[in-house]
Image (tube, grey):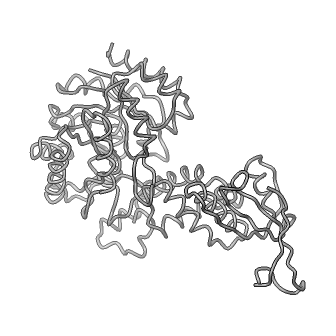
């Protein structure tokens, strides 16, 4: 009930049904989300910023609280949220969540290295979060490979990818790619 | 009567400013926990930091994560944190909220009060006794800010329930006077009746804090300076609790970041004066 799963759980008493609709339970649900929002805004800064830009960070959190068991461990909570958001239908948000998750893991685990494919240039996206510079999704479309790697300068690097395939092949196919470093 | 405050993170400026102003420091194990190899633990760096605090003032521990009232278990992870702390630093006593924060192993993300039933009473009393045996120092239970209205089947009054646990186990109490104000505002608690009934001889520690009003609710959020009404209630509690040793000003480290360490220090000076702790 406190996590908004009341409809599925089916409250089994008049008191539970009354409680479910009460302002007290609503406030508790809001507090639960508020704390998550506070912590995840801090610990998943980049993904949270993109969700806020899209205007549905709060709604995403409510979904997350409903759908996942949660954790008292800060790292685990951030991991869970980023893992959940990595499945977002918006490719930019999903790529950022995967990227942030990879960066967190590379900071925690010596030798950890992971790559994430982007359908947008990461540079303007990071500039948006770090410096508040705006961007249009369509204007930064492209194919980029982001690598979280503790051994790289700054722990990360990314490359623009040029498919060596006929233009009619869709992005994401198994065609080989060559890489050209775009920036880091 | 002593004055204390909470230290919840590696904030060198806060430590520098507030530790000289207090007689005791309260820490929460939950605020220092990190994941190491999938297990919750307090990192060596945090234990060293806490040991540094312990060299400057006596420490008491106040937990959030034990979930002493969960019907199926308490948090073994939290017990692990307590084990670490008790091994690392001298601790005068420790305390936990009389409530639960987990159901079937799932964290709720908030604290909920217990049903005041004989069944809950037996469960909590057994756990209090076990934890007292484990650590051998006093253990206190704190009244939580109640979020949900009663269902009418309670077998004890709010104070009567606490008194029964004290009688069963000999544990101490941590009286949070701001939580009483939250309860008065949110669920209509009669504070005078509660205090008249509560076994005030068991109160060893008093909590004082500032929160906020939001959508008609008074929130127990430790984000603000202390209001006059809370100070007055703390003074009343101090005068009526013969075994109370310390008043702790609770402040979240997130709130310290907003208010500033200087403001927290000034609040401690003000509280010491207003509470007559000079």
Q: Residue at x 18, y 47 (%)?
A: B134
Is B165 located above or below residue A14 in the figure?
Answer: above
Q: Residue at x 70, y 68 (%)?
A: A116
Is A59 located above or below residue A27 in the figure?
Answer: below
Query: Percent position (x, y) of residue B234?
Result: 31, 27
Query: Percent position (x, y) of residue B240?
Result: 19, 25
Decide which of B36, A68 is in the foreground and name it. Answer: B36
In the picture as drawn, the residue positioned furthest to the right comes out as A167
In the picture as drawn, the residue positioned furthest to the top comes out as B278
Decide which of A167, B175 is in the foreground and name it. Answer: A167
- Asked whether the viewer can see residue B218, the reply is no
Q: Residue at x 36, y 62 (%)?
A: A19
Location of residue A103 (image quadrant): bottom right
Tally of numbered discs:
0
Q: Quadrant of the C terminus of chain B?
A: top left
- Asked whether the viewer can see residue A82, the reply is yes
Decide which of B156, A161 is in the foreground and name it. Answer: A161
B160 vs A124, left or right, is left
In the picture as drawn, the residue positioned furthest to the left comes out as B168
Query: Percent position (x, y) of residue B207?
Result: 33, 33
Location of residue B76 (image quadrant): bottom left
Q: Quadrant of the N terminus of chain B?
A: top left
B102 vs B140, left or right, is right
């Amino acid at each position: 009930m406190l996590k908004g799963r009341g409809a599925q759980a089916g409250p089994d008493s008049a008191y539970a049904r009354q409680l479910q609709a009460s302002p007290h339970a609503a406030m508790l649900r809001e507090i639960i989300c508020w704390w998550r929002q506070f912590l995840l805004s801090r610990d998943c800064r980049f993904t949270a910023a993109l969700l806020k830009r899209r205007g549905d960070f709060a709604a995403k959190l409510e979904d997350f609280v409903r759908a996942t068991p949660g954790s008292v461990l800060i790292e685990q909570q951030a991991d869970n949220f980023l893992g959940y958001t990595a499945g977002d239908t918006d490719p930019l948000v999903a790529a950022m969540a995967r990227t942030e998750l990879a960066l967190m893991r590379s900071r925690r685990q010596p030798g950890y290295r992971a790559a994430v494919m982007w359908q947008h240039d990461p540079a303007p996206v990071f500039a948006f979060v770090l410096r508040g510079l705006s961007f249009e999704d369509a204007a930064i479309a492209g194919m980029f490979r982001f690598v979280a790697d503790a051994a790289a300068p700054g722990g990360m690097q990314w490359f623009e990818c040029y498919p060596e395939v006929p233009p009619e092949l869709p992005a994401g196919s198994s065609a080989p790619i060559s890489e050209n470093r775009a920036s880091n | 009567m002593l004055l204390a405050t909470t230290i919840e993170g590696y904030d060198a400026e806060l430590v520098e400013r507030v530790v000289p102003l207090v007689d005791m420091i309260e820490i929460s194990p939950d605020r220092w926990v990190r994941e190491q190899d999938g297990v919750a633990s307090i990192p060596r760096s945090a234990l060293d930091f806490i040991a540094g605090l312990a060299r400057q003032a006596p420490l008491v521990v106040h937990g959030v994560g034990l979930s002493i009232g969960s019907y199926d278990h308490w948090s073994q992870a939290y017990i692990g944190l307590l084990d670490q702390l008790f091994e690392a630093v001298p601790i005068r006593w420790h305390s936990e909220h009389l409530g639960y924060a987990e159901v079937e192993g799932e964290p709720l993300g908030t604290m909920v009060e217990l049903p005041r039933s004989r069944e809950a009473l037996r469960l909590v009393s057994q756990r209090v006794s076990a934890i007292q045996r484990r650590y051998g120092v006093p253990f206190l239970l704190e009244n939580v800010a109640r979020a949900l209205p009663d269902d009418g089947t309670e077998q004890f009054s709010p104070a009567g329930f606490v008194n029964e646990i004290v009688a069963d186990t000999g544990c101490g109490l941590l009286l949070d006077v701001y939580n009483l104000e939250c309860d008065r505002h949110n669920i209509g608690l009669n504070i005078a009746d509660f205090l008249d009934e509560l076994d005030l001889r068991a109160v060893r520690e008093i909590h004082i804090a500032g929160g906020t009003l939001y959508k008609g609710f008074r929130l127990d959020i430790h984000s603000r300076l202390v209001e006059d009404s809370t100070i007055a209630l703390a003074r009343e509690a101090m005068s009526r609790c013969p075994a109370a040793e310390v008043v702790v000003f609770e402040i979240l480290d997130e709130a310290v970041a907003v208010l500033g360490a200087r403001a927290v220090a000034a609040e401690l000076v003000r509280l010491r004066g207003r509470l007559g702790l000079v």
